Image (cartoon, helix red, strand yellow):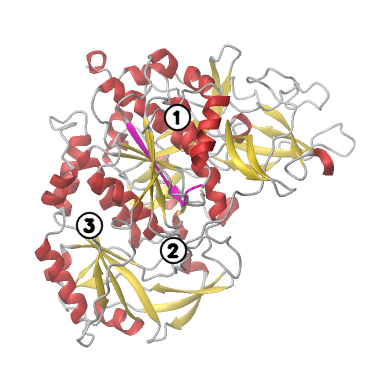
Amino acid sequence: MHIRGVNRRAGVALAATLPLLAAAVAAGAPAIAASPAGHVVAGGKPAWTAAAVDRGQTAAGNAVTARVYLSGDQAGLASFAASVSDPTSAAYGHYLSAAQVKQQFGATKAQIDKVVAWLKGAGFRTSVDPDGNYVAITGDAATVQSAFGVKLHDFAVSGHVYRAPTGSPVVPADIAASVVAVSGLSNKPTIMTHDDTLPGPGAAFVNAGPFSSYYGSNAAKSLPKAYGKTVPYVVKGYNGHQLRAAYGAAASGKTGAGVTVAIVDAYDSPTINSDIRNYAHRNGDAAYKAGQFKQYDAATWTNTGDPSQANPNGCGASGWYGEQTLDIEAVHAVAPAANIHYVGAASCQDADFISALSFIVDHHTASLVSDSWGSPENQSDPANDAVYNNVFMKGAAEGIGFYFSSGDNGDEVANTGTRQSDMPASLPWVTAVGGTSLAVGKKNNYEFETGWGTGKSALSTDGKSWTGFPGAFHGGAGGGTSARVAQPWFQRGIVSSALAHANGNKSAMRVVPDVAAVADPNTGFLVGQTQTWPNGTVKYGEYRIGGTSLASPVFTAIQALAQQEQGFPLGFADPAIYARHGLLHDVTDHPFGPKVGLADARVDFANSVDASNGLVVSVRTLGQDSSLSATKGYDDVTGVGSPSLSYIESYNWRHFR
């Protein structure tokens, strides 16, 4: 999702740790071909090229900027990360410091020097990341093709022409062990522009009433029935007290004290400090203590403009402000004593997110990291899979766990035309968080959940029926089976063979999500944010929001409570979560039986802010997530389930062992 303007008054600049390039070094040798004894490294032809028109080979003189990501003992890192993450292992929880991880598993100076020497000899200009994570290279297409033994072609798609490799890059055998991946050979959509100025607050949004104060409290008696019964109006927006009570956080007595949660998004809202404090005060959350919230910002911002046909790489910076605000306010609402460190990436592109995540790992900024962003698997660059995995494995070795929203488009068919999961949520070293529709009762009690999947039907002209009920798919938790990530060990025996081999996969593959939490915007969370109003004024306002962008920070906050209960970092949590699969709420689409449908009535302002242009009335169904289904046991909407008191308390090892 998205964020905005940088006001560094309380932030810490990352000028020394998140630059795209250090000083460039001019190369003086002609290009050479890759060694015949070379090794293939991560990457290959991106899936998006299948639907594109191949325009032929990229012009030899076209400029290419890329990164050669580095590693030391990759196999050793993977083995160590698995052992310290496995509750059945004697090594569980025996993590290393950031310095120890770098020393034991990072690329050595000798390895880096050898890679740089080869790259310079191949004709590239090079610069080494100060933390030793990658070598940035600049050259032309001819140099790339000669050095990496790969062809670059131009592909026309969506009105634009992008460059991409037609195969995987190859590097000489004597440096292969030091190279994780070569990223940037495809420039969709990674061409950067440079702009240090962030836009102001985004356009205002206001929820129209009527509302329910808790689920079902206000019946829509004047509207048509759905599924043969009167339905309730949507909730105004749950607050932290309701979520803490419903998910067992309040009963656990845990607050996240002593735990630090990092949140990674793009950009940094100029009003975030006042907004989160205003929201906490208005909604009864604990006041922020001195030093409890910190910001770490990229040195410069790029691609801040809105995306358009003319600007396909625009990130829409002001849109990210709402994401940042939601993430921070949700974490604080559920884990009020946890420290929150916000890390703002320079843009919404992979390279900048990787730099932000690497900063957390290289400096051990936090032990839990919430990430509410991603893209469909086929639209992501496979070269980055290994890069992200390297960051996440180093994090696991340090006791850092990464949580990613699973997406808001169900199986992605309505969005992309192809059934697929999302990235980076589908990678094997992260916890993918799916979504639910949550019913919180009058006493803040947990009543029920369904998988989040919405059908939308508009009120008929005569007001007597719902048009086309139950309506077309209108958003739902992302999930499904990856086409390129093999099944991780912790899913064996829990994820069904049918899901693991879905979409024609002959081998068992990674299925997402792993867990779930409230995400349905119609049973969503109330947030507070400074917005720009139609009359030009800029002021604070509150509105209900959802998506797995809500689920990720909520579940991460629950993990902060579990970590406080356990007394040491959870690290990469999936093995421990799957070991506890019977302790979470087992969410299904039909909690009251297969013949009992559920729906809510919703009223919206036609212009998003007031009734001057009229109202739009619709009914929204629950548990209708594209081709995905929440069923008993593991499923591809909610994983192994949503948080519960039993789950949180199970991390008290006196009880669990």
Residue found at the very far front of the displayed protein: 9
Q: Left or right: 314 with respect to 359? A: right
Image quadrant holding the C terminus, namely top left
**Residue type indicated by callout 2:** Ala
State whether residue 328 is above or below residue 150. Answer: above
Looking at this view, is 456 or 116 the one in front? Answer: 116
Q: Main secondary structure of the magenta part?
A: strand
In this figure, which residue is indicated by the disc labeled 3?
Answer: 131
Whether residue 98 can be seen here: yes
State whether residue 151 is above or below residue 621. Answer: below
In this figure, which residue is indicated by the disc labeled 2?
Answer: 47
Write down the region rendered in magenta.
260-269
Label 3 packing within 10 angstroms: few (<14), some (14-19), many (20+) = some
Give x and y (percent) for residue 175: 14, 68
What's the mark number on residue 332?
1
State whether residue 310 is above or below residue 129. Answer: below
Label 2 packing within 10 angstroms: few (<14), some (14-19), many (20+) = some
Badges 1 and 3: C-beta atoms under 8 Å apart?
no
Q: CA distance from mark 1 to mark 3?
A: 31 Å
Whether residue 581 can be seen here: no
Q: CA distance from mark 2 to mark 3?
A: 31 Å
Residue found at the very far right of the displayed protein: 462
Looking at this view, is 222 or 606 the one in front? Answer: 606
- As for residue 222 lying within the magenta part, the answer is no
Look at the numbered disc 3 and give the secondary structure of its residue.
loop
* Residue at x 36% of width, y 45% of height: 510
**Residue type indicated by callout 1:** His
